[in-house]
Image (spheres, grey):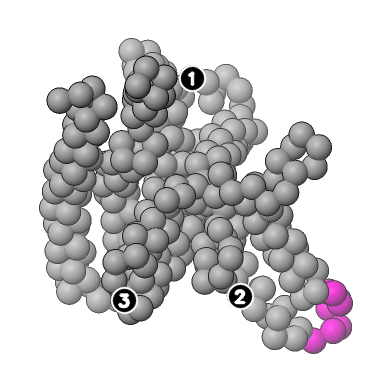
Amino acid sequence: MQLTPDALIYFKIGDIAFNATIVNTWLIMALMTGLSVLATRQLRPDVPPNRWRTLLEVIVQGINAQIREIASGPTTHILYFAGTLFLFILVSNLLTVVPGFHTPTASLSTTTALAATVLVAVPMFGISRRGLLTYLKSYAQPTPIMLPLNILGEISRGISLAIRLYGNIMSGAVIVAILLSIAPFFFPVLMNMLGLLTGVVQAYIFAVLATVYIASACPRESDK
Amino acid sequence: MTELGLIAAVSIITAGLTVAIGAIGPALGEGRVAATALSAIAQQPDAASMLSRTLFVSLAMIESTAIYCFVVAMILLFGNPFWNAALQSAAATG
């Protein structure tokens, strides 16, 4: 019963062991970067877009529209960050249908790393848009007694982001593994399909929550 | 009962109780969320896409508590630190 792909070691170079999480993350990175490079090869205004470039544009514009509904102000950098999070988690969850692929988001290491990037990005956006003192003062709103509670709230947001993604994906994999030993062919396939749907929803949730946290750290239109 | 047996029995019972009791609250909450979302869509059908999106986000947030309980149950069953330590001490003495 394997709870996490961290325990599955593919090969060792010297002292460093490369487990399934790292190798599969590299695979996803190579896949996404390779496909994007192939699709955007002749990016000039006079070249008519082929269907792959149109597909990429539809995806990016869709994500941009979603982010613009949540955050006010310039959203380009939020698009880079939250869009990358969404696409990485989406591709890694959808590739579970490929046999032999252990999705890296089923490991607590990956999800904690992603949540840590969100935890770092929120103060970065806040300080760059509001100024250091104004951002630090926002922790003491509405009264200075709330200061430890606000800090605790930030930390618990990050922890819940990591465990939500890890728990959803890991539980899908574990349930399929248990059902394979109990039930005939049909039920594990159904649970796998449910796992795909859960993976897509969780990718969307992660990106939307990251956008909401960043938007709450940025100045609102009413502040100006 | 030996110490090993006691640890195993308590872990298994607690794992079962954790998931059983921990799934009640989120299920009730999600039912209320779905009912309210359906009545809101019935009142304003052209806001359906925004309501559906908010519905999915709320469902995922509420689901988190049930997922925490599931993770605790998995740790109790498959990654139990006390079980491994007790096994080692029993193998050393017995």
Where does label 2 land, which residue?
Answer: A58
Check disc 2 and give the amino acid type: Val
Asked whether disc 1 touches disc 3, contact meaning CB atoms under 8 Å apart, the reply is no
Q: Chain of mark 1?
A: A
The rendered magenta stretch, by its main secondary structure, is classed as: loop
Q: Earlier in the sequence, mark 1 or mark 3?
A: 1
Do discs 3 and 2 share a chain?
yes
Check disc 3 and give the amino acid type: Pro
Query: Measured from the top left, where is residue A62 in percent x and y?
Result: 55, 69
Please determine whether, in this image, residue B43 is positioned above or below residue A211. below
Residues packed near mark 1 inside 10 Å, few (<14), some (14 to 19) or many (20 plus)? few
Q: Secondary structure at mark 2?
A: helix
Label 1 vs label 3: CA separation?
Answer: 59 Å
Query: Measured from the top left, where is residue B73 in percent x and y?
Result: 28, 41
Q: Nearer the viewer, mark 1 or mark 2?
A: 2
Label 1 vs label 2: CA separation?
Answer: 40 Å
Frontmost residue, A62 versus A203: A203
Q: Earlier in the sequence, mark 1 or mark 2?
A: 2
Residues packed near mark 2 inside 10 Å, few (<14), some (14 to 19) or many (20 plus)? few
- Residue sitting at 70 percent across and 64 percent down? A32
Check disc 1 and give the amino acid type: Lys
Where does label 3 land, which residue?
Answer: A184
Do discs 1 and 2 share a chain?
yes
Q: Which residues fall within the magenta stretch?
A: A41-48
Q: Earlier in the sequence, mark 3 or mark 2?
A: 2
Please determine whether, in this image, residue B69 is positioned above or below residue B93. below
Label 3 vs label 2: CA separation?
Answer: 40 Å
**Residue A102 bears which disc, if any?**
none
**Residue A137 bears which disc, if any?**
1
Residue B18 lies in quadrant: top left
